Amino acid sequence: MKRLKLLGFALAAAFGVSQAQAEELTGTLKNIKETGAITLSYRDSSIPFSYLDDNQKPVGFAMDICYKIVDAIKKELKLDKLEVKLAPVTSSNRIPLIANGTVDLECGSTTNNAERQKQVAFTNTHFLTASRYVSKKSSKINSIDELKDKPVVSTAGTTNIKQLTEANAARHLNANIIPAKDHAEAFLMVETDRAVAFVMDDILLASLVAGSKDPSAYVISSDAFSTPEPYGIMLRRDDPAFKKVVDAATAAIYSSGEGQKLYDKWFMQKIPPKGLNLNTPISAELKAEFAKPSDSPDPASYKVK
């Protein structure tokens, strides 16, 4: 009888522990566990971070990182399978869709800054970029000041259009700033001479030039609107348990050498669908970031000493 009573207590204790563990899950992790699904968002033309291949499948450097995060979440939650749902986003709606819970991770080319951290969170930095402009060589635009009184395009909802607007006011450029719905539309405006320049992150400009009909016709400015800024995978704010899992996953990728392999795959080799090679070696700053992963929004913190 005594043995049965002890067994009863043990079972009750074990049940209590498993129940407590289930109850410990909160926020995004709880939702993923209950639904058996996670939603990743992607961009359709942010080459090579997140874009559609010729089968209309989202691929890219950030997509690969997100799939590795999914594997870590699946392991953390001890799930046999985890359904991955994919949702397209634009520069304008990506932050609201993370904030309102429509998507769980944004796999793209989103700049991590202090202003955005008031609405969303970011995991460890996967790229560092500066805001520059692309123009046709024939336009002979050699500096930001030479954009004066000219039509200049940038993508709506980006930090770049904000930087362009600020520079326009501070430098009295009187440029006609045109907001485009996405990067592809913005580049097309330069291609068809509806704008003399497109202001965007330098690596995205490099990818658009590489994929254009005549890459030799374009030049990316040495003049920059910003110091190198960090890109991060975006997730919901005020969800520490989920962020802890995502941060551990990305830190493991970057510090293990896997980050360098993924980088080389997308920046130093031919990529789909056209077999373009961006031929952009990893910077000293990003190499240092991979060695000691950080989610800092401060560009100054990424300077190599």
Image (cartoon, rainbow, N blue to C red):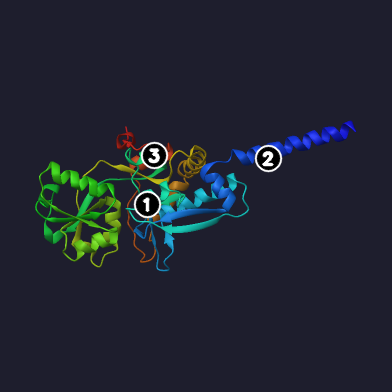
Q: Position of residue 283 (x, y in %)?
A: 33, 44
Are dots 2 and 1 in contact, CB under 8 Å? Answer: no
Residue 75 makes an appearance in the image: yes
Report the number of numbered marks: 3
Please tell me whether residue 139 is drawn above or below residue 303 in the rendered image: below
Q: Which residue is mark 1?
A: 94
Judging by the rendered image, the residue that carries numbered circle 3 is 289
Residue position for label 2: 18
Q: Could you tell whether 278 is left or right of 189 in the image?
A: right
Helix, strand or loop at mark 1: helix
Identify the element where label 3 is drawn.
helix
Choose the circle earlier in sequence order: 1 or 3. 1
- Along the horizontal axis of the image, is 189 left or right of 262? left
Q: Residue at x 50, y 48 (%)?
A: 69
Instruction: In the rendered view, tell whether residue 250 sits above or below residue 203.
Output: above
Rendered-image quadrant of the C terminus = top left
CA distance for labels 1 and 3: 25 Å
Label 3 sits on what residue type? Glu
> In the displayed structure, would residue 209 be above or below residue 246?
below
Callout 2–callout 3 Cβ contact below 8 Å: no
Q: Quadrant of residue 284?
A: top left
Quadrant of residue 6 in the image?
top right
Residue 184 position within the rendered picture, expressed as x and y whole percent measured from the top left: 28, 61
> Is residue 223 shown to the viewer in this render?
no
